Amino acid sequence: MPSRSFRSALPGWVSTTGLYVLTYVTYRCGAIRRKVAILNECVNHLAWLRDRFGRTNLHAHRESLWKSMIGEMQEGTWTVYEFGVAWGYTTDFWLSRVGNSVESWHGFDRFTGLPRGWRDLPAGEFDAGGKTPAIDDPRLHWHVGDVEQTLPSVPISPHRKCVLFDLDIYEPTAFAWEYLRSSLSPGDLAYFDESFDTDERKVIEHHVLKDFRLELIASTPLASCFRLAERISN
Ligand SMILES: C[S@@+](CC[C@H](N)C(=O)[O-])C[C@H]1O[C@@H](n2cnc3c(N)ncnc32)[C@H](O)[C@@H]1O
């Protein structure tokens, strides 16, 4: 029969042993290690959203988050700017559901993949062979090339704007925000497909939040969507 002091120490011993086993198994297995690291980033992402913007409406999948954004876009006339298209999964999902309130859709991509490595992905990941997706919709305008080159020649719409960021990496995402920021207005929407990652988070922290107060509409463990509230700077 263990002594009283030993029994009261047992939970601590069990948790220390559990921690040892979990740490050892995670440390030894690269695949588990990567999953644990991403889980940690997702938890930190949700904590950051809560601390910065209050309670989040959490969705399991980005598709259900997109449906809630589409629900927000039933009134008025909207233009969508999609940064990072690849094979057009997002474009196709949205255009088959948005209805008439979206009058035009601008898709920006070099279609040759990431210009530099990002996380554990090499440069060239998401290479669509230079081809635009085969989506047939008269509202759709493709802008092929580096966004730093293509965006400045696109006329800015006078309508409400929904901006979808999925370029993954900091530099072009920051460029797109800096280019559009003065044309955006309170009520417009901004979606970040990887706000759990440091690149897009840096754009939100260092650029977006300097220009607008943000209202968090919803998130997933990886992504988030905001409504622009009042402008902070011009
Ligand atoms: C994650 S993929 C987009 C995936 C797409 N949104 C989807 O859900 O299917 C990221 C894309 O960003 C594009 N990209 C990254 N940097 C870019 C840049 N500077 N200019 C244009 N496109 C860029 C890449 O070519 C790649 O196709």
Image: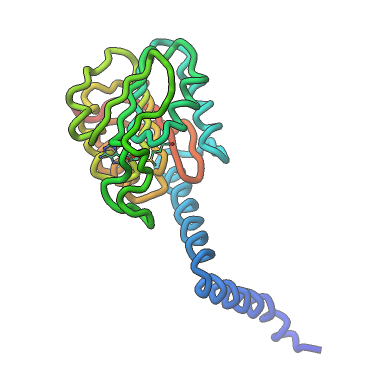
- Residue 148: x and y in percent read 19, 35
Q: Work out which quarter of the rendered image holds the N terminus and state it.
A: bottom right
- Residue at the spot x=22%, y=28% of the render? 151
Instruction: Determine the quadrant in which ligand 1 lies.
Output: top left
Q: Work out which quarter of the rendered image holds the C terminus and state it.
A: top left
Residue 187, located in which quarter of the rendered image? top left
Residue 189, located in which quarter of the rendered image? top left
- Residue at the spot x=47%, y=56% of the render? 38
In the image, is residue 138 above or below residue 226?
A: above
Which one is in front, 108 or 178?
Answer: 108
Residue 196 falls left or right of residue 176: right
Which one is in front, 21 or 79?
Answer: 79
- Residue 56: x and y in percent read 50, 38
- Residue 157: x and y in percent read 27, 15
- Residue at the spot x=47%, y=26% of the render? 92
Residue 190 falls left or right of residue 179: right
- Residue at the spot x=51%, y=36% of the render? 62
- Residue 28: x and y in percent read 52, 75
Which one is in front, 118 or 210?
Answer: 118
Residue that sits furthest to the right in the current view:
1
In the image, is residue 181 above or below residue 118?
A: above
In the image, is residue 29 above or below residue 80?
A: below
In the rendered picture of this protein, how many numbered marks are placed on residues? 0
In the image, is residue 119 above or below residue 75?
A: below
Residue 64 falls left or right of residue 189: right
Which one is in front, 9 or 193?
Answer: 193
